Amino acid sequence: VPKLKIENLHVNVEGKEILKGVNLEINGGEVHAIMGPNGTGKSTLASALMGHPKYEVTSGSVTLDGEDVLEMEVDERARKGLFLAMQYPSEISGVTNSDFLRTAINAKRGEGNEISLMKFIRKMDEKMAMLNMDESFAHRYLNEGFSGGEKKRNEILQMMMLEPRIAILDEIDSGLDIDALKVVAKGVNSMLGPNLGVLIITHYQRLLNYIKPDFVHVFMQGRIVKSGGPELAERLEAEGYDWIKEELGIED
Ligand code: ADP
Ligand code: MG
Ligand code: MG
């Protein structure tokens, strides 16, 4: 069972401290949600965990199954089972979706253990069908000309194909209409189980009606300031964040 442990994580972006002591533990079988106002560092946390070079860890630790994640190269993190569905996925011209995915899967499986083309195609067809994605998406260049909603579905397709151990989903619900939201949630829910821990980053409680979190964390000013169960998300939806600021004496 996977275990991701983040302790007192501090991260600078361009010399400015954005994360100011994040503590969070995610175990296999758990769904965690991070909610918080814009610009408080939620995506920074996701990028820092994946090893984006712009995000400089100044102190703290991150371990996956006891291994030091911060010492790992970006591709090694992916091989160990960390996955990020990005808030703003990039377009890669000249690389088809299917080529990208097969390369990523085989990089993870390692030399001599590549997935057969038949198995790959069958798996991709099955997952795309579950996400209501047209077959043509397999052969289109990665995210090029995809609508916002199509990009989000494609991020979930990547997750379903790569079968990560810890998945971070950064605003996977933004820009989705209710039908697309349900499809995306169905894909995520089909993956849930003891071998997967999920971190959902979202602005809105809506997604959490479809993917049930076990834990909800409020993120403000570069750290988790409050944690609770699903009822916390409902209160945030109804009342906003002001009551938390008052409760904690936070000024903005
Ligand atoms: P959130 O995801 O909570 O909306 P972000 O993590 O995207 O917040 O941003 C937090 C702060 O860090 C913002 O002030 C943002 O401008 C800054 N920041 C994040 N990433 C970068 C970057 N790549 N370059 C410059 N500033 C950044
Ligand atoms: Mg934002
Ligand atoms: Mg963000």
Image: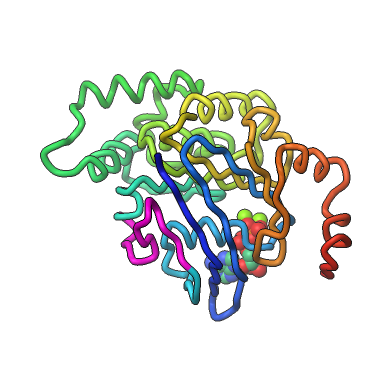
Question: Magenta includes 68?
Answer: yes
The way the protein has been coloured in the rendering is rainbow
**Residue at horizontal 46%, vertical 39%?**
28
Please indicate whether residue 170 sits to the left or right of residue 156 in the image.
right
**Residue at horizontal 41%, vertical 62%?**
51
**Residue at horizontal 44%, vertical 47%?**
3
**Foreground of the two, 60 or 12:** 60
Q: Which residues are magenta?
A: 61-75
Q: In the rendering, at what x and y percent does residue 24 appear? A: 56, 55
Image quadrant assignment for residue 225 = bottom right
Please indicate whether residue 71 sits to the left or right of residue 176 in the image.
left
Residue lying farthest to the left in this orientation? 112
Q: In the rendering, at what x and y percent does residue 169 appear? A: 54, 44
From this view, report whether residue 111 is shown above or below residue 250: above
Q: In the rendering, at what x and y percent does residue 84 appear? A: 47, 48
Question: Magenta includes 118?
Answer: no
Residue lying farthest to the bottom in this orientation? 15
